[in-house]
């Protein structure tokens, strides 16, 4: 059974997450994996805890919530 870990910045709404889970599951279905076998885990990570190029994402992308 595939387990997909998705790391995203904290703050996405539940509808976005629901759509992402469905879309990821669909990709596996298209490759012959039954949907009940697919697990998607979403990790909400605050931007200040996400580093890109040696700096926090809050500094690199200050205008993106």
Image (spheres, rainbow, N blue to C red):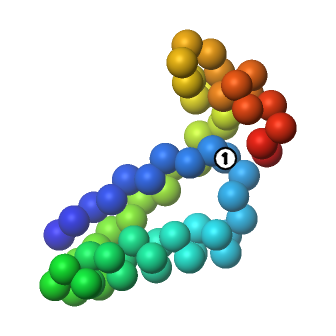
- Report the residue at 47% width, 72% height from top: 21
Q: Is residue 4 left or right of residue 44?
A: left
- 6 lies left or right of 11: left
Residue 57 occupies quadrant: top right
Q: Position of residue 59 (x, y in %)?
A: 74, 22
Residue in the picture at 37% in, 53% down: 5
Q: Taking the image as drawn, is residue 37 in sight? A: yes
Q: Is residue 23 above or below residue 53?
A: below
Residue 48 can be seen, yes or no: no
Kindly identify which residue carries mark 1. Answer: 10
Q: Residue at x 32, y 76 (%)?
A: 27
Give the class, few, some or many, for how many residues have Cα within 10 Å of label 1's Cα (few <14, many ≥20): few
Position of residue 36 measured from the top left corner of the image (x, y, whole percent): 28, 84
Note whether 60 is above or below 15 in the view shown: above
- Residue 56 locus on image (x, y percent): 65, 21
How many discs appear? 1
- Which quadrant would the C terminus be assigned to in this image? top right
Secondary structure, mark 1, is loop
In this rendered view, identify the residue nearer to me: 46 or 53: 53
On-image quarter of the N terminus: bottom left
Query: In which quarter of the view is residue 54 placed?
Result: top right
Q: Is residue 64 above or below residue 12?
A: above
Q: Residue at x 80, y 31 (%)?
A: 62
Farthest residue toward the top?
54
Q: Quadrant of residue 49?
A: top right
């Amino acid at each position: 059974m595939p387990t997909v870990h998705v790391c995203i910045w904290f703050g996405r709404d539940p509808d976005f997450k629901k759509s992402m889970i469905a879309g990821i599951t669909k990709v596996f279905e298209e490759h012959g994996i039954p949907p009940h076998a697919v697990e998607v885990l979403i990790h909400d990570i605050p931007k200040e805890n996400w580093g890109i190029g040696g700096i926090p994402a809050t500094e690199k992308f200050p205008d993106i919530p």
